Image (spheres, rainbow, N blue to C red):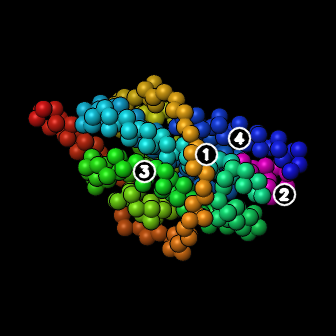
Amino acid sequence: MLKTEKQLLQSIKAQTAKGNRDNISRTKAYEQFFRIHPEIQWSFLAGMVSRNAGWNMCDLEGIWFSNLLGLKYRHQLFLTYEEANWRIFQDAYPQLLLYHYSTKYGRPLFHLCQYFFITKFMKNEWHSFWKHGNREKLVTALIINEQNIIEEPVIKKQSFVFHSLLFFLQDWMHFSTVLFPTCNGELYGSSVSNFRNIDKRIELGKRLAGLLFSEDLFPLFYEFSCRTEPTGARYDYEQYRKKPRYHETPMLRGVYPLIHHQAGETEQWDMKKKVKKKWFIEPKWEEDPHLTEWYDHKQKQLHTAAIIKNWIL
């Protein structure tokens, strides 16, 4: 290995560690990368989904979910969100930086993927993108990769969370919908039932990518990203609504400490399973992505449930 490559590896590791401190730092890192490399669409998708993860985390300490859910379950659910997003960033951000430095030095550096335990599947996809420039295929590949990254260590191991009645109800009622806000107060997005199913999660990711980069809506979502500092509080987008809800959820860094993770397993998922052909098929839309009224209805359901619980207990 060349001396410059060793230095590059150290730099990438340091930048990844800095960006992977918490949800806020991840969101900023993804979205800043997209502003430098708009051809890597997944980085913007990851940033917007990361914002949603922050909102979901802070919901747990907000005035409604803290009444509905017990402290133990809320803490475990936070750790699950945190670990899933940490693992994805830990794997994906070095890939983004390898691409960045490849463009800087004018030659592909994806042979260095092995030093970050990046799958051969993704190494091949980056080489393909470098050669052919197929943006949509790279987005899909990264979606496939991220969901497989969390499948074993998070989805299957966190049985306390994903097999609980509370998670089933949340899943069934679509409270875990991913939202893409705009600065005019409108909300768009999509949801998935049976979150434990990897095929469903990949399908959701592809639908979200299609929505995010739709010709009419992308400028609105990008404006929101540029104008809105991520805090984890839902006021990030409530502030743009006609009747904003003020401070129903806290800012993330005001309620959660930094979590120190251990990487643990380094076995690559593509050594144990094959990539399904259907994962690359264009997704089907079965719902209206305009969710402004739907969101208001779900908020009323949530508030009613919290009030009923307090009344009963």
Residue 157, label in figure: 3
Magenta extent: 97-109
| Residue at x 87%, y 44% (from the top left corner) | 4
Q: Residue at x 42, y 54 (%)?
A: 156
Disc with the residue nearer the chain's start (4 vs 1): 4
User: Mark 1 vs mark 3: which is more N-terminal?
Assistant: 1
Q: Amino acid at mark 2?
A: Arg
- Can residue 227 be seen here? no
Q: Earlier in the sequence, mark 4 or mark 3?
A: 4
Magenta stretch: residue 100 in it? Answer: yes
State the residue at coordinates (79%, 49%): 101
Q: Choose the circle earlier in sequence order: 2 or 4.
A: 4
Task: Tally the marks.
Answer: 4
Query: Is residue 3 visible to us here?
Result: yes
Q: Is residue 15 magenta?
A: no
Instruction: Give residue 13's mark.
Output: 4
| Alpha carbons under labels 1 and 3: distance apart | 19 Å
Callout in the foreground (1, 3): 3
Real-space Cα separation, disc 2 to disc 1, in angstroms: 23 Å
Mark 3 residue type: Lys
Q: Secondary structure at mark 4?
A: helix
Residue 38 in the image: x percent, y percent? 67, 53
* CA–CA distance in space, label 2 to label 3: 40 Å
Q: Amino acid at mark 1?
A: Gln
Q: Front-most of 148 and 173?
A: 148
Which residue is drawn at the image coordinates 77% and 44% (left, top)?
9
Provide residue 27's location: percent of width, then percent of height: 56, 41
Q: Which mark is residue 230?
A: none
Q: Which residue is mark 1?
A: 90
**SS assignment at label 1:** helix
Badge 2 marks a residue whose secondary structure is loop
Q: Are marks 2 and 3 in contact (CB under 8 Å)?
A: no
